[in-house]
Image: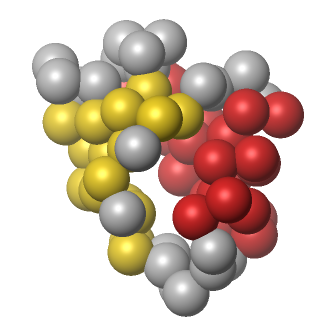
């Protein structure tokens, strides 16, 4: 799934997002484009579970 995260502005944000996702799916693969504020996530978890985890951490994720 490809998500847009408008408040992702730096490598620190990307690292935080990686930690959030890996805490709920350690096998997830993430590919960031910080300039475009997008992340491609490969995970077996439902999209809603991933976006909810990001939202709770302050990263508003949109499909």
Residue furthest to the right in view is 56
Residue 10 as seen in the image, left or right of residue 36: right
Q: Nearer the viewer, residue 46 or 22?
A: 46
Query: In the image, is 53 to the left or to the right of 11?
Result: right
Residue at the spot 47% in from the left edge and 35% down from the top edge: 62
Q: Quadrant of residue 3?
A: top left
Image location of residue 58, percent across then percent down: 73, 21
Q: Is residue 10 left or right of residue 21?
A: left
Which residue is depicted at the point 64% across and 48% down?
A: 51
Q: Quadrant of the C terminus?
A: top left
What colour scheme does the image use?
secondary structure
Say how many tags the image has: 0
Q: Is residue 17 above or below residue 30?
A: above
Q: Quadrant of residue 9?
A: top left
**Residue 30, horizontal then vertical, whole percent:** 36, 61
Across and down, in percent, residue 31 comes to 26, 55
- The answer to whether residue 29 is seen in the rendering is yes
Residue at horizontal 83%, vertical 34%?
Answer: 56
The quadrant the N terminus occupies is bottom left
Question: Is residue 22 depicted above or below 35 in this figure?
Answer: below
Q: Residue at x 68, y 40 (%)?
A: 54
Residue 41, placed above or below residue 36: below
The percent position of residue 53, horizontal first and vertical second, equals 76, 48
Residue 19 makes an appearance in the image: no
């Amino acid at each position: 799934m490809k998500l847009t995260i408008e408040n992702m502005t730096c490598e620190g944000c990307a690292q935080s997002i990686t930690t959030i996702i890996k805490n709920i799916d350690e096998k997830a693969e993430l590919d960031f484009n910080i300039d475009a504020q997008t992340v491609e996530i490969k995970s077996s978890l439902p999209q809603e579970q991933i976006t909810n985890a990001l939202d709770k951490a302050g990263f508003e994720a949109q499909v």
